[in-house]
Amino acid sequence: MPTTKTSQKKVNPTLSADMVRSYLHEIGRVPLLSHEQEIVYGKQVQ
């Protein structure tokens, strides 16, 4: 049975943690929807 080699890059854990921290920082800049806004937008999607 043939096997396929996949390229797996090792990621530096510090770099990975920095990327996650950066992502969380960026999404923290966007305000969350209020309960009422979620209802209104949810109805618009349906």
Image (tube, grey):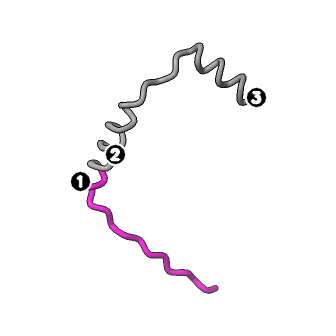
Inspect the image, locate mark 3, and give the three-letter code of the amino acid beneath it. Answer: Gln
Is 8 magenta? The answer is yes
Q: Are marks 1 and 2 in contact (CB under 8 Å)?
A: no
Q: Is residue 8 left or right of residue 15?
A: right
Examine the residues drawn in magenta and state their main secondary structure.
loop
Q: Where residue 26 sits in the image (x, y, percent)?
A: 35, 38
Q: Is residue 28 above or below residue 21?
A: above
CA–CA distance in space, label 1 to label 3: 42 Å
Label 2: which secondary element: helix
Label 1: which secondary element: helix
x 66%, y 19%: residue: 40
Please name which of the two marks, 3 or 2, marks the residue nearer to the observer. Answer: 3
Inspect the image, locate mark 2, and give the three-letter code of the amino acid beneath it. Answer: Val
Q: Where residue 14 sits in the image (x, y, percent)?
A: 23, 53
Inspect the image, locate mark 1, and give the three-letter code of the amino acid beneath it. Answer: Thr
Q: Where residue 32 sits in the image (x, y, percent)?
A: 47, 24
Snapshot quadrant of residue 41: top right
Q: Is residue 20 above or below residue 4?
A: above
Q: Earlier in the sequence, mark 1 or mark 2?
A: 1
x 59%, y 13%: residue: 36
Query: Which residue in the structure is indicated by mark 2?
Result: 20
Q: Is residue 44 above or below residue 2?
A: above
Query: Which residue in the structure is indicated by mark 3?
Result: 46
Query: Which residue in the structure is indicated by mark 1?
Result: 14
| Residue range of the region highlighted in magenta in the rendering | 1-16
Instruction: Using the image as rendered, state which of residue 44 and residue 35 is in the foreground.
Output: 44
